[in-house]
């Protein structure tokens, strides 16, 4: 990585970080922290728990962002001193340490720069993700479960909370579908580039003749609704069914009919939630999922109108977006960005940052 002259590399990093600082508008972020700290110290803050959580969560996030930028700036300043010291002392160990820090800092600043590209209307929101098995029978169900694990591990690596709302298990192995929420700022903007059809090619572990099988799984990513969205759903437009939660193999997870399925009659959208013990909690979670789906439907309709006005007839870029080949060779390749790696195990264990960041940059070029 450190092939550039250190002075030139440091100059480039300084320019990138300065640009990031301007985009984030650090002075206004500091002003927001001051305002939020006043709100957070109000004695009646927790009278409204939803608002209190919103204030404290936002305060923690903005403080973290400021701390992240400040830390990178300090590291960049210290690195310049380290290179000067290594040159003055002709110390190979210090030089090697400085070059390792240069690689690490380049990666960290690059990740922050990608975040500044998330400027869409809903990009700052948490994400609601649904994974579905598509063509490929039991292999597709198994692949859907592999993707669920991949995103779970990705969230864990980033310290993001993840809550599974509903899992529909397949009969032989894997899952028919799963819906989960990623509870982190910018989770929607980040993960929305994962939306589309994922393809797996491998020797099927379910085929007694050991034949190669191609299977597919779909990923849908929605922004989580907020109070300001005003998604009204009249009671006469929904049908609510309750049933008993179940896990893999059909065993009961709960002995009461606490799982909830909601059908939106005008659109035919069906959502369900069974992760909570209480039917009331499951209904509230299912309604949130339904509101997110209706919000996205409205957004897509508005986008279609704009595309028609602009004469834009291009289809969705999400279809067939990534291939995972485990046989006859090992390769994961993004079909939009051309990013690829032979380390399939790492990718399926959640190491997808390179693909996500490339997807965000690619999307910006498509929008520009």
Image (cartoon, rainbow, N blue to C red):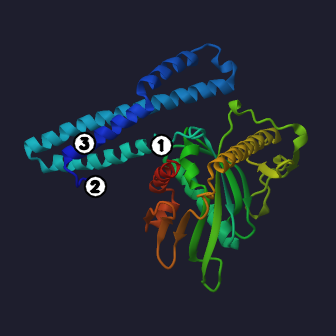
Q: CA distance from mark 1 to mark 2?
A: 24 Å
Disc 2 to disc 3: CB gap under 8 Å: no
Q: In what element is the residue under mark 2? A: loop
Residue that badge 1 annotates = 117
User: Which residue appears farthest toward the bottom when viewing the image?
Assistant: 209
Q: Would you say 366 lies left or right of 262 here?
A: left
Q: Earlier in the sequence, mark 3 or mark 1?
A: 3
Is 284 placed left or right of 109 in the picture?
A: right
Query: What residue is shown at x 36% (from left), y 48% (from top)?
Result: 107
Tell me the quadrant of the picture where the N terminus can be found: bottom left
Q: Residue at x 57, y 30 (%)?
A: 57
Task: Find numbered disc 1 in the image and state the secondary structure of the residue it sits on.
Answer: loop
Residue 277 is tagged as none
Q: CA distance from mark 3 to mark 1?
A: 22 Å
Residue lying at the far left of the rendered structure:
89
Of labels 2 and 3, earlier in sequence is 2
Residue holding disc 2: 1
Q: Residue 21 appears in which quarter of the rendering?
A: top left
Against 337, residue 199 (above or below) is below
**Where is residue 242 drawn, in percent x and y?**
87, 48
Residue drawn at 42 percent across, 41 percent down: 112
Q: Within 10 Å of the Cα at label 3, are there few (<14), some (14-19), or many (20+) other Cα atoms?
A: many
| First-in-chain label (1 vs 2) | 2
Identify the element where label 3 is drawn: helix
Q: Mark 1 and mark 3 in contact (Cβ < 8 Å)?
A: no
| Depicted 204 relative to depicted 219: above or below | below
Mark 1 vs mark 2, foreground winner is 1
- The vertical placement of 27 against 328, above or below, is above
113 or 54, which is in the foreground?
113
For discs 3 and 1, the disc positioned in front in the rendered view = 1
Q: Which residue is mark 3?
A: 10
């Amino acid at each position: 990585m450190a092939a550039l002259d250190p002075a030139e590399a440091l100059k480039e990093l300084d320019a990138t970080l300065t640009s990031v600082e301007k985009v984030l508008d650090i002075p206004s972020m500091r002003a927001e922290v001051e305002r939020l700290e006043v709100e957070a110290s109000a004695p009646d803050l927790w009278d409204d728990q939803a608002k209190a959580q919103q204030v404290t969560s936002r305060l923690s996030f903005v403080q973290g962002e400021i701390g992240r930028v400040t830390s990178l700036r300090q590291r960049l300043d210290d690195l310049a001193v380290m290179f000067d010291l290594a040159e003055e002392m002709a110390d190979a160990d210090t030089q090697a340490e400085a070059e390792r820090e240069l690689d690490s800092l380049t990666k960290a600043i690059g990740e922050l720069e990608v975040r500044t590209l998330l400027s869409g209307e809903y990009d700052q929101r948490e994400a609601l993700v649904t994974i579905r098995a598509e063509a490929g029978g039991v292999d597709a169900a198994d692949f859907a479960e592999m993707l669920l694990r991949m995103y779970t591990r990705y969230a864990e690596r980033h310290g993001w909370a993840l809550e599974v709302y509903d899992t529909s298990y397949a009969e032989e192995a894997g899952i028919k579908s799963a819906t989960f929420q990623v509870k982190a700022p910018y989770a929607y903007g980040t993960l929305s580039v994962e939306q589309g059809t994922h393809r797996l090619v491998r020797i099927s572990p379910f085929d007694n003749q050991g034949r190669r099988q191609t299977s597919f799984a779909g990923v849908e990513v929605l922004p989580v609704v907020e109070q300001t969205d005003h998604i009204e759903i009249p009671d006469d437009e929904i049908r609510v069914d309750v049933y008993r939660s179940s896990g893999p193999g059909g065993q009961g997870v709960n002995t009461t009919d606490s799982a909830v399925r909601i059908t939106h009659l005008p659109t035919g959208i069906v959502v369900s939630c069974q992760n909570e013990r209480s039917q009331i909690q499951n209904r509230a979670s299912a309604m949130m999922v339904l509101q997110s789906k209706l919000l996205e439907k409205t957004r897509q309709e508005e986008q279609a109108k704009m595309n028609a006005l602009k004469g834009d007839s291009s289809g969705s870029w999400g279809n067939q977006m990534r291939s995972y080949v485990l046989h006859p060779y090992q390769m994961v390749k993004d079909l939009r960005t051309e990013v690829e790696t032979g380390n399939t195990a790492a990718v399926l264990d959640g190491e997808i940052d390179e693909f996500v960041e490339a997807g965000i940059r690619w999307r910006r070029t498509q929008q520009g």
